[in-house]
Image (spheres, rainbow, N blue to C red):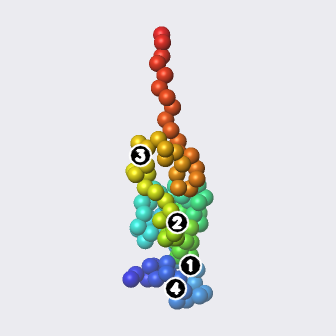
């Protein structure tokens, strides 16, 4: 594990009086294992924390940990999965208009014949 990766997992800085380590967008993308363009788009849209220094995005270890937390997805409860039906199973059945979550499924518009 690299020194930068240990900070992502909640490790503290070894020297508290030093300024935080700053990573470029390229370095941060490599640590997060995402594309640099994705990280820059998220920062430009203000969806992830960052610092702007000299016109460039910079990311601290705390920023990287927060980006991971923001994008974390928790699994659904087992009971929820059992209640849902597979869409492939209902495909083609006219009586299965409602999905398991109670919302009506969208149907395509009927085709109309255009007359010129």
Residue for badge 4? 11
* Residue 108 at x, y percent in the picture: 49, 35
Q: CA distance from mark 1 to mark 3?
A: 54 Å
Q: CA distance from mark 1 to mark 2?
A: 43 Å
Residue at the far front in the pictured view: 95
Residue 27 visible, this orientation? no
Q: Nearer the viewer, mark 4 or mark 1?
A: 4
CB within 8 Å, label 4 to label 3: no
Q: Earlier in the sequence, mark 1 or mark 2?
A: 1
Q: What residue do we see at 56% from left, 76% from top? A: 62
Q: CA distance from mark 4 to mark 1?
A: 13 Å
Q: Residues within 10 Å of mark 3 (few under 14, many from 20)?
A: few
* Residue 54 at x, y percent in the picture: 57, 62
Give the number of the disc on residue 91.
Answer: 3
Give the number of the disc on residue 109.
Answer: none
Above or below, 14 relative to 103: below
Q: Earlier in the sequence, mark 2 or mark 3?
A: 2
């Amino acid at each position: 594990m690299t020194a930068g990766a240990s900070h992502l997992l909640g490790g503290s800085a070894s020297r508290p009086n030093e300024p935080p380590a700053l990573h470029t967008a390229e370095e941060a993308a490599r640590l997060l294992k995402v594309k640099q363009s994705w990280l820059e788009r998220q920062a430009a849209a203000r969806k992830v924390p960052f610092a702007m220094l000299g016109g460039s995005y910079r990311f601290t270890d705390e920023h990287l940990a927060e980006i991971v937390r923001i994008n974390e997805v928790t699994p659904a409860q087992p009971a929820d999965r059992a209640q849902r039906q597979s869409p492939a199973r209902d495909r083609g059945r006219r009586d299965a208009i409602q999905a398991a979550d109670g919302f009506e499924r969208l149907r395509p518009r009927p085709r109309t014949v255009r007359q010129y």
